[in-house]
Image (spheres, coloured by chain):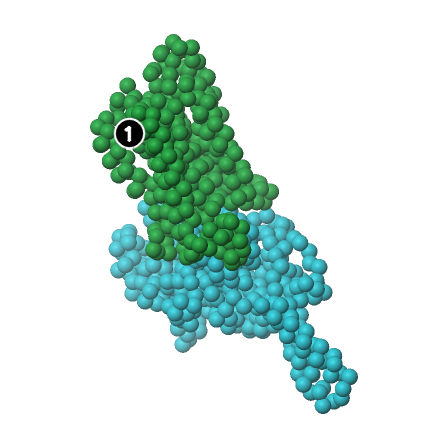
Chain colours: A green, B cyan
């Protein structure tokens, strides 16, 4: 693909993102006229409740959507390259399952052991859920990281990650089995994922960490390109595969672990967007793909958030369902058009 | 709104000051005003003593009321404090900053839990409700009509709370059931400037203690005196019923709950049903259990211990023995089923599926006790018809 076309595509994507951002701010269960929204964004005090809804609810939600879309897509891309597997995604290392386990313990085990958990979250307050998710993710990250140093072969690491995902999933199931209906519902709703839970306070923690992870990913562009041609080739050009693996895991933990802690597990985006990027831009080069997945991921997530508002009605759908129902056909269409996925991975 | 009232009050007050220089022909008018102000003050100044409930406390200070909700999961800690001031008097106070400051009486409330609707009905203030969590589940007729006419909106609760709609509505108080502050939703509402009342009545240990939370809700409406009277009557009725039951000798064995996919969900030893069974003189083999919710037991254990139990307090979703059999054929093995002694709290259901049990049972512990006692000892209370429970046919 010519450079000019690429640049054009990038510009189109950026325009799309801005458009979707505006639409996302306009839609919600309370109807607020668009001129008023512009006024509120420019600092005017239109109506207390509307100002609050736009500035403290819809705006952080839209920014969360952009971060989630960009972050999970980048992690997914790195995972697919690292394991040379088109089905890999950001959750494949089990780090997000670790976050789920942390949350499950906080929500459900806290009734079994009231003393311990009571002290913990009355100290942490509303940060308790996020803190427990980050704690869970970190533990799995450390375990997987240590395994990565010991193991020379990426496929083994992939299997270890998946096994950890299964183990934590099983523990969560046991907790669910013994919990009361309210706790169960609380936890299950958390697993549906939600972009609207992030407040500005939390954004101050979430955004920098995710951006740091993204920054790390951009630094890794050259080594990732080399990895794509095979680990032996990469070693041949002087890249330490073990070291790159660790950095990729760190970057994924920062992005996927943090995002999962704040929004719950959001599936599908990380797997689908890299394929869309490859098909649209016709290249496997990370120099193009990394920025491409950032933009496509952000745009797609904004669209999914818009769709989850079910424009025209008062209900909202859980974000995980929308990403899968909407994203699935899109990926199928994209792949069918490009005829082959394997070409990018051999 | 507060300023307008303040202006009216102060202009009336200044009229009073001016006219006090004059004579008696004005004193009749001003003494009416004075009585009204005294009435407002006295309804605010009345504090009731809390006899059963352990989850909240009310303390009167000079010009404001301190309402504390205690943390049932951390003994000794305060879950949330509220400082109630009479409307219009907020600026005159320097109030502590460790609690939510609320002007009373409140004029609009979002009642996000069914039991609150029952208590609001008890106090006679359902017209102040502007939002509920699930509008289709409202049993109370006047409230249901207001839902249909659009005066009351549904906003969900907990994680499914429709944040935008409730912020846009801005009710003067949002009352939630408060579950361990795990979800962020309530904190977000407080940050948005709304007052959120945590009503943790469901963690109380006795039926009367749960009903006494009517005084908690009444404090927000300056209706503590009325609540006190109504509750005293309720207490008397409850102890009358209990004293009649005390003469009974036998204690029939009880089974409860239902079976699903290998697990029998048995109400625990500290559940609402268990407490009523103790007061109503029933025998229940799980009295020593300490859970408030349900215990997950295996079908075999229940079968072995309770297959010959005399009476079954069954699942609310079944209205007939046939329905029970369709749910699980093995229910027919139980003696209580064979004898037709299965009762469920499904008597007061309307055609939309809303069940008054969830709204009114907490505020009518006397009727609940009478129901359970009547089921256990049919000879008691001749002529009394079951209110919440019905026998499954």
Q: Nearer the viewer, residue B7 or A233?
A: B7
Residue B220 at x, y = what percent? 58, 65
Residue highlighted by disc 1: A279
Residue A115 at x, y = what percent? 57, 43
- The quadrant of the image that shows the N terminus of chain B is bottom right
SS for dot 1: helix
Observer able to see residue A69: yes
Q: Residues within 10 Å of mark 1 (few under 14, many from 20)?
A: many
Which residue lies at the image location 37% right of the left edge and 16% below the top edge?
Answer: A226
Which residue lies at the image location 36% right of the left edge and 36% below the top edge?
Answer: A13
Q: Nearer the viewer, residue A307 or B229?
A: A307
Report the label total: 1
Which residue lies at the image location 32% right of the left edge and 57% below the top edge?
Answer: B335
Observer able to see residue A274: no
Residue B196 at x, y = what percent? 55, 57
Farthest residue toward the bottom? B25
Q: Nearer the viewer, residue B151 or B346?
A: B151
* Corner quadrant of residue B156: bottom left
Residue B127 at x, y = what percent? 48, 71
Which residue lies at the image location 61% right of the left edge and 67% below the top edge?
Answer: B2
Identify the subunit bearing mark 1: A
Q: Position of A107 compared to B12: left or right?
A: left
Q: Is residue A256 above or below residue B336?
A: above
* Corner quadrant of residue B17: bottom right
């Amino acid at each position: 693909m010519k450079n000019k076309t690429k640049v054009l595509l990038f510009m189109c994507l950026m325009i799309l993102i801005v458009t979707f951002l505006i639409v996302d701010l306009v839609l919600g269960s309370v109807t607020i006229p668009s001129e008023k929204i512009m006024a509120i964004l420019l600092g005017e005090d239109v109506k207390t409740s509307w100002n609050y809804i736009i500035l403290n609810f819809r705006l952080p939600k839209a920014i969360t959507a952009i971060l989630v879309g960009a972050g999970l897509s980048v992690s997914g891309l790195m995972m697919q390259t690292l394991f040379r597997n088109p089905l890999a995604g950001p959750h494949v290392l089990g780090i997000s399952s670790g976050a789920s386990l942390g949350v499950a313990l906080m929500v459900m085990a806290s009734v079994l052991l009231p003393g311990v958990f009571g002290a913990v979250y009355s100290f942490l307050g509303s940060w308790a859920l996020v803190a427990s998710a980050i704690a869970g993710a970190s533990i799995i990250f450390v375990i997987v990281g240590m395994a990565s140093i010991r193991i020379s072969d990426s496929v083994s690491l992939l299997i270890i990650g998946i096994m950890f995902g299964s183990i934590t999933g099983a523990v969560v199931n046991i907790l669910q089995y013994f919990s009361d209906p309210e706790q169960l519902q609380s936890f299950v709703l958390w697993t549906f994922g939600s972009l609207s839970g992030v407040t500005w306070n939390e954004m101050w923690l979430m955004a920098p960490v995710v951006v740091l992870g993204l920054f790390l990913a951009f630094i890794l562009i050259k080594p990732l390109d080399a990895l794509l041609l095979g680990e032996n080739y990469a070693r041949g050009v002087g890249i330490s595969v073990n070291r790159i693996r660790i950095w990729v895991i760190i970057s994924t933990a920062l992005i996927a672990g943090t995002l999962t802690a704040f929004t719950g597990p959001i599936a599908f985006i990380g797997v689908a967007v890299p394929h869309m990027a490859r098909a649209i831009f016709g290249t496997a080069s990370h120099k193009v793909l990394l920025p491409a997945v950032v933009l496509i991921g952000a745009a797609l997530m904004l669209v999914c958030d818009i769709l989850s508002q079910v424009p025209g009605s008062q209900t909202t759908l859980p974000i995980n369902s929308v990403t899968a129902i909407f994203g699935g056909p899109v990926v199928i269409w994209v792949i069918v058009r490009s005829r082959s996925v394997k070409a990018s991975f051999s | 709104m507060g300023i307008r009232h303040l202006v009216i009050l102060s202009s009336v007050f200044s009229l009073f000051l001016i006219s006090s220089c004059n004579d008696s022909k004005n004193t009749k008018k001003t003494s009416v005003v004075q009585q009204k102000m005294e009435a407002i003050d006295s309804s605010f100044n009345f504090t009731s003593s809390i006899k059963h409930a352990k989850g909240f406390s009310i303390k009167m200070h000079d010009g404001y009321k301190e309402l504390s909700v205690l943390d049932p999961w951390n003994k000794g800690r305060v879950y949330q404090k509220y400082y109630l001031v009479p409307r219009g008097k907020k600026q005159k106070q320097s109030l502590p900053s460790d609690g939510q400051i609320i002007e009373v009486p409140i004029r609009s409330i979002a009642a996000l839990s069914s039991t609150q609707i029952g208590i609001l009905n008890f106090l006679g203030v359902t017209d102040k409700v502007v939002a509920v969590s699930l509008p289709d589940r409202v049993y109370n007729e006047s409230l249901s009509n207001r839902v249909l006419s659009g005066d009351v909106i549904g906003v969900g609760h907990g994680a499914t709370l429709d944040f935008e709609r409730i912020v846009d509505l801005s009710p003067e108080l949002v009352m939630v059931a408060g579950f361990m502050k795990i979800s962020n939703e309530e904190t977000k509402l407080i940050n948005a400037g709304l007052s959120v009342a945590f009503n943790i009545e469901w963690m109380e240990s006795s039926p009367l203690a749960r009903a006494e939370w009517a005084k908690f809700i009444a404090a927000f409406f300056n209706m503590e005196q009325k609540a006190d009277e109504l509750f005293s009557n309720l207490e008397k009725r409850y102890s009358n019923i209990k004293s009649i039951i005390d003469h009974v000798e036998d204690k029939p064995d009880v089974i409860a709950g239902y079976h699903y996919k290998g697990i029998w969900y048995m109400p625990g030893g500290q559940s609402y049903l268990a407490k009523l069974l103790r007061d109503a003189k029933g025998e229940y083999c799980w009295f020593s259990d300490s859970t408030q919710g349900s215990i997950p037991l295996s079908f075999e254990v229940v079968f072995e211990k309770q297959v010959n139990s005399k009476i079954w307090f069954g699942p609310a979703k079944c209205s007939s023995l046939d329905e029970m059999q369709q749910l699980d054929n093995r229910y027919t093995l139980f003696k209580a089923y064979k004898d037709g002694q299965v009762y469920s709290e499904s008597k007061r259901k309307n055609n939309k599926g809303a069940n008054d049990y969830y709204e009114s049972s907490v505020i009518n512990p006397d009727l609940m006790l009478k129901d359970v006692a009547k089921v256990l000892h049919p000879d008691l209370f001749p002529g009394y018809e079951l209110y919440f429970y019905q026998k499954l046919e």
